[in-house]
């Protein structure tokens, strides 16, 4: 089902099937030659929207790094990335050094309780919070207040209930603080599957 539907059984849509071919080709390149597409591993439709939103003065926190870290660094002012995988932390460190990227603060943090610790960040200062790893429900609950008015929160793999236990209830309680909520069900770069992401804007 993941080839054409998300985990809730939502069909990707006939208009998105051509992106499935792109995703399949990228997945072959990654598995056969280790070539990663220079895109976040989130739905293509979400990438398209975020690419139009990002600004050079934005301050971003990303829980769970990857090619998205490099992608965000090109479009935003400063990116703090917290990564739990030591292998990916090392890979990203090398890529950042090779490309002389200086606006990313990369942190290796394997402990979930520390990944969702936003104590060092003032309230309402982030332009974008991206959650694609760690204890996601706790990262959302603790990081939500750190996003400014009119700022954005992106939640990847929203169609995997185990990742977001209690988060629907949290967002329902915060509904008065939300200006918009948009779901993106689409194929993902470098992995031939369908995922759903949720993009929120605060009032």
Image (cartoon, rainbow, N blue to C red):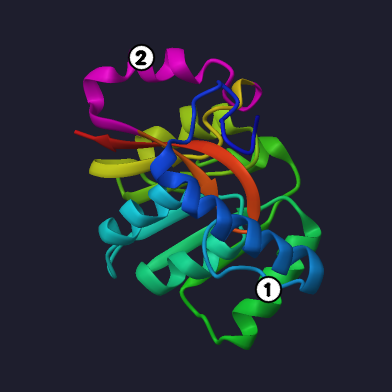
Badge 1: few (under 14), some or many (20 or more) residues near its Cα, within 10 Å? some
Q: Which residue is mark 1?
A: 93
Q: Position of residue 155 (x, y in %)?
A: 47, 37
The residue depicted at 76 percent of the width and 71 percent of the height is: 34
The residue depicted at 43 percent of the width and 17 percent of the height is: 170
Q: Under tag 1, what secondary structure?
A: helix
Residue 191 against residue 73 in the figure, above or below: above
Q: Is residue 123 visible?
A: no
Q: Is residue 162 left or right of residue 48?
A: right
The residue depicted at 59 percent of the width and 68 percent of the height is: 37
Magenta range is: 162-182
Residue 174 against residue 93 in the figure, above or below: above
Residue 57 against residue 15 in the figure, above or below: below
Q: Which residue is mark 2?
A: 172
Q: Quadrant of the N terminus?
A: top right
Q: Position of residue 126 (x, y in %)?
A: 34, 50
Q: Quadrant of the C terminus?
A: top left
Q: Position of residue 60 (x, y in %)?
A: 41, 56
Q: Position of residue 109 (x, y in %)?
A: 71, 51
Q: Is residue 139 visible?
A: yes
Q: Is residue 136 left or right of residue 142?
A: right
Q: Under tag 2, what secondary structure?
A: helix
Q: Is residue 22 magenta?
A: no
Dots 2, 1 in contact, CB < 8 A: no
């Amino acid at each position: 089902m993941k080839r054409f539907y998300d985990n809730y059984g939502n069909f990707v849509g006939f208009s998105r099937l051509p992106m499935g071919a792109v995703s399949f080709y990228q997945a072959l390149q990654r598995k056969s030659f280790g070539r990663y597409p220079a895109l976040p591993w989130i739905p293509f439709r979400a990438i398209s929207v975020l690419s139009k939103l990002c600004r050079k003065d934005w301050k971003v926190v990303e829980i769970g790094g990857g090619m998205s870290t490099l992608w965000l660094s090109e479009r935003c002012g400063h990116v703090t990335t917290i990564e739990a995988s030591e292998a990916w932390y090392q890979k990203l460190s090398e890529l950042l050094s090779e490309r002389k990227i200086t606006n990313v603060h990369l942190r290796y943090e394997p402990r979930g309780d520390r990944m969702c610790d936003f104590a060092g960040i003032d309230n309402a200062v982030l332009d974008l919070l991206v959650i694609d790893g760690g204890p996601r429900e706790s990262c959302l609950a603790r990081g939500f207040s750190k996003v400014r008015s009119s700022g954005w929160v992106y939640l990847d793999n929203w169609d995997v209930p185990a990742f977001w236990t209690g988060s629907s209830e949290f967002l329902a309680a915060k509904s008065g603080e939300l200006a918009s909520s948009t779901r993106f069900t689409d194929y993902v770069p470098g992995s031939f599957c369908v995922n759903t992401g949720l993009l929120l804007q605060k009032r």
